[in-house]
Image: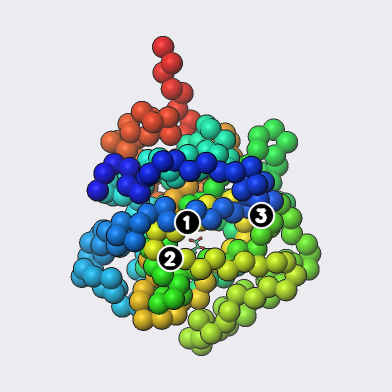
Amino acid sequence: MSDHPGSPAPDSVSADARAAFERDGFHFLRTLFSPNEAAEWRERINAILELPTGHAAAVAGATHTLADGITTNSEFWPIIFNERLLSTVRALIGDEIRYTQHSDLHINLPGGRWHRDNACREFGVGADWDERVQPYRVVRIAIYLSNFSDSGSSLVVLPGTHRRETRLGRREYVLWNKTRTFMRKYGHNEKLPHWFITNPRRVIRTQPGDCIIFDQRLTHAGGVLGGPNPKYAMYLSYGLDNTHSQNHRAFFLNRPTYSRELPPKLEAKLAAHNLLLGHKPNTE
Ligand SMILES: O=C(O)CCC(=O)C(=O)O
């Protein structure tokens, strides 16, 4: 695979798409990788997790995760430097983006609770919500490698919740999550769909190679699994070179599962591509 897989001419993001990202908090980038490339990424995930090869190597239903799997395994680094991904993220949040790590590899993560991925998860509370000095521009990249039709692969988002949340919306969020905890306890997690009454909801059904770019503050949940094949997904993050991005990276580095030190070769490559957070490029 080349250094920039799945990278034909960089996409331009229309003014309408940019406005929709500002308003809704997410952007759907179809086919970042071709179906063949998606199959290759699935194989790499199988290999790293020491699973047999083949699309359904991971039995549907069996969950495997590797926190920071993209950062710590060099065969996944081409994703970080993918030109089409970088140009789309730059078009959405600004030119001076940096790699904010927060990467994961997942197989069959079960349908999840509503949550945000940022450091200050309660709406309006904490530094992430204070944009008086610097704009919050940290995005999560979710790349799906499976088809909704045979695995249930999907992400459910509540558009606009990176900018607003009503009291009623908060109550509804808590109620659904309590219900999910209860259903999980009795082994019925996948029977509970992701409904939401007090905010519009969007179910993004994926095909292999699709990518969703979303504000880390957007309320979302992994869709319920379903079908004979497993759901494979890869995640990473970028942000503008500012304190919000630094806070975000620091928040995840405090978790024991994320690598505190970047692999030196990745650090050098990020610096060379002006993607290293907090690094001042040598302009002489
Ligand atoms: O399973 C998914 O697609 C979503 C996972 C997720 O919400 C997360 O990693 O924050």
Snapshot quadrant of residue 158: bottom right
Image-based side of 116 in relation to 124, left or right: left
**Which residue lies under the disc numbered 2?**
207
**Which residue lies under the disc numbered 1?**
30
Contact (CB < 8 A) between labels 3 and 1?
Answer: no
The percent position of residue 257, horizontal first and vertical second, equals 39, 55
Image-based side of 144 in relation to 160, left or right: left
Name the residue type under label 1. Answer: Arg
Name the residue type under label 3. Answer: Asp
Measure the alpha-carbon separation of dots 3 and 1: 17 Å
Q: Is residue 16 above or below residue 272?
A: below
- Along the line of sight, the residue nearer the viewer: 53 or 282: 53
Measure the alpha-carbon separation of dots 2 and 3: 21 Å
Q: What element carries label 1?
A: loop
Contact (CB < 8 A) between labels 1 and 2?
Answer: yes
Indicate yes or no: mark 3 CB to ligand 1 under 8 Å.
no
Q: Upstream in the sequence, badge 1 or badge 2?
A: 1
- Along the line of sight, the residue nearer the viewer: 30 or 259: 30
Measure the alpha-carbon separation of dots 1 and 2: 8 Å
**Which residue lies under the disc numbered 3?**
24
The percent position of residue 14, horizontal first and vertical second, equals 59, 43
Q: Is mark 3 on a helix, strand or loop?
A: helix
> Extreme right residue here?
167
Q: Residue at x 40, y 77 (%)?
A: 150
